[in-house]
Amino acid sequence: MRYHLDFRPYSRHFSEPTPLGQAQALERAGIIVRLTDTSSGSVGYGEVAPLESFGSESLDGALQQLRSFCGIISSDDITQLVLTGFPCCGFALSEALLQSRIAAVARALETKKPPIDKVPCAALLSGSAADPAVEISRLATLGYRSCKIKLRARRPEQFPIPPETLLSAARANNIRIRFDANESLSVSDAREWLDVLSNDPDSVEFLEQPLDRMMIDEMRELAEDYPIPIALDESLGALRLSILKKESMDLDQFLWVIKPALGDTFLAELASIPQDKRIVSSVFETAIGFEAVLRHAKDSVIPAGLGTLDAFAPDPWKLHTAGPFIHRIGWTRLPYDKLWRSVKQH
């Protein structure tokens, strides 16, 4: 089936410099796509939100690929994008295609006012919080049961607040902490952190990406030696080619951070990663991409990593409300046309 393809680049300014991978970014850029069924006229929208540092295509590469279709694309073309190095384009167009195909069904459901899913979410513990222990207590009062904190020190004794204090606050408030190292640790550093965290394993949800993305065997040893689960994030993109080739890999020891907007859901299915080992995560999408991510997170067992909504100043692209449970707006309720028309303002 053939579809008419339109797309518009956008950019949004963060309210403060925000880490995207290893770099601090001042803005988030992406592309809104619109597919129109040439036979029925039904329309679907999606968002291309690449992060090249995580193994996706670049923004320029995505734009060139979309231009190459000259305004007409087929469902077979969309399937091939996921397999040929354009996972973000593939995700965006697949979501738009799905919307277009079930538009009539969605309209019928809207008249019956179906319940909207609530997706459990982990909080992002601000690095600028004056007292993280007090902040943990506040988050627990709001209803959060897990929160994420970035490791800003290679060794526990260099951390701005003693890790033991954080764990004590977590235990007192019945909340669990996920620590994200973003590939910043050596093996010895990681073992020092895990030695500390293992003193209170019930207060630790997992340690995320402690080592370089290619050090799979070393992280497997950490997972075997400590009671703290190891979650891999950047490593999924590094294993992309092996997964696509369906090479045999022993990945059962890990949890996996799945970023649907980067095509990770497709990789997770190919690698047979079970739902109870997936942590669905946002990459600072607009409301269009965020709603698509929520659709993939609605069956999550582990609270999703969706604490990105407060990173931007109020703008037309922020339609969801942050909290321990984030409500899906639903395709029939999201003002896609209005958002599409506002792209030129960004």
Image: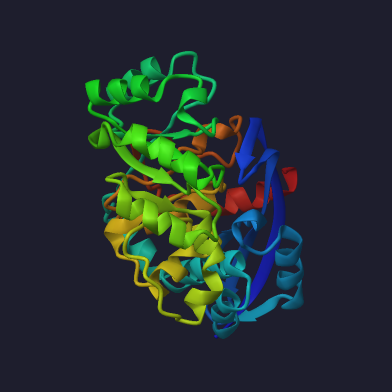
Residue 346 vertical placement versus 44 (above, below): above
User: At 51% across and 72% down in the image, what residue appears?
Assistant: 97
Q: Looking at the picture, how far across and down is residue 345, in whole percent? A: 73, 43
Task: Specify whether 46 is left or right of 346.
Answer: left
Q: Quadrant of residue 3?
A: bottom right
Q: Is residue 213 above or below residue 102?
A: above
Instruction: Tell me the quarter of the image containing the N terminus.
Output: bottom right
**Residue situated in front as seen by the camera: 52 or 113:** 52
Residue nearer the viewer, 239 or 193: 193
Measured from the top left, where is residue 283 in percent x and y? 54, 48
Q: How many marks?
A: 0
* Frontmost residue, 122 versus 130: 130
Q: Which image quadrant is residue 190 in?
A: top left
**What colouring method underlies this structural image?**
rainbow
Instruction: Tell me residue 270's x, y (percent).
Output: 41, 75
Q: Quadrant of the C terminus?
A: top right
Q: Position of residue 163 (x, y in %)?
A: 39, 25
| Residue located at (74% from left, 66% from top) | 61
Q: Residue at x 52, y 24 (%)?
A: 158
Q: Is residue 313 above or below residue 259?
A: above
